[in-house]
Image (cartoon, helix red, strand yellow):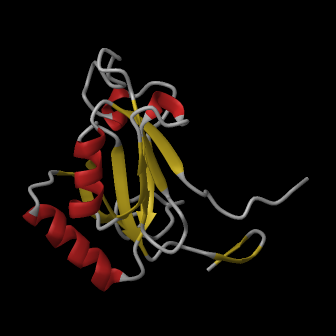
């Protein structure tokens, strides 16, 4: 068996690259690594690659056709839709101070917090097997559910939580 080291990036289709670029840069603080299209040799012919650190990208959006159906036609977001497929993506913040700054910033930007803030675990949401992290959840303009978190439980060795 081989070892995977991390999730490298997530890719999404969107009908509005500009709207998603604005949200991820203005609200979440990502930087644009590159933008291509129309007519580029990428899925959909246009894309925007975004990063939150020194890696080329953690999130990429591809241009969906204007008449493409939405992913979440019944509820408007990936958490409430509750069907096989994407549920949420989580971005780690370095500590509680940054997490609190992020919570304030999103509220100032008018982003509705859908769930939280809370601690996943018996001391917070009551989930005994929780990871102990502080978290809150919200949706991007396309309805993709996003978690911002810090302080997650880590494992020093296989099977040993901290």
29 shown above or below 62: below
In which quadrant of the rendered view does residue 3 lie?
bottom right
Nearer to us in this view, 134 or 77: 77
| Residue at x-position 35% and y-position 51% | 146
- Residue drawn at x 49%, y 61% is 130
Above or below: residue 56 compared with residue 9 = below
**Residue 14 percent location from the top left of the image:** 35, 34
Q: Is residue 123 visible?
A: yes
Tell me what residue is drawn at x 35 percent, y 63 percent: 148
Specify the quadrant of the image occupied by residue 8: bottom right
Q: Quadrant of the C terminus?
A: bottom right
Q: Position of residue 100 (x, y in %)?
A: 24, 77
Residue 86: horizontal and vertical position, in percent?
47, 36
Nearer to me, 27 or 32? 32
Q: Is residue 126 left or right of residue 15?
A: right
Give the residue at the far right of this rendering: 1
Residue 49 image offset from top left, x and y in percent = 44, 53
Q: Is residue 121 visible?
A: no
Q: Is residue 14 above or below residue 114?
A: above
The mark tally for this picture is: 0
Seen at 52% across and 32% down, the residue is 43
Q: Is residue 1 left or right of residue 81?
A: right
């Amino acid at each position: 068996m081989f070892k995977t080291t991390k999730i490298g990036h997530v890719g999404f289709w969107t009908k509005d690259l500009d709207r998603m670029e604005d949200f991820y840069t203005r609200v979440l603080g990502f930087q644009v690594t590159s933008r291509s299209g129309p007519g580029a040799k990428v899925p959909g012919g246009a894309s925007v690659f975004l990063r939150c650190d020194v890696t080329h990208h953690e999130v990429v959006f591809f241009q969906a056709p204007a008449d493409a159906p939405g992913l979440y036609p019944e509820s408007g977001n990936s958490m409430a839709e509750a069907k096989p497929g994407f549920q949420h993506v989580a971005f780690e913040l370095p500590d509680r101070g940054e997490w609190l700054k992020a919570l304030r910033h999103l509220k100032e930007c008018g982003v509705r917090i859908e769930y939280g803030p809370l601690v996943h675990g018996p001391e917070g949401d009551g989930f005994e097997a929780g990871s102990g992290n502080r978290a809150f959840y919200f949706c991007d303009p396309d309805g993709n559910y996003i978690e911002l978190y810090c302080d997650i439980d880590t494992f020093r060795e296989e099977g040993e939580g901290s």
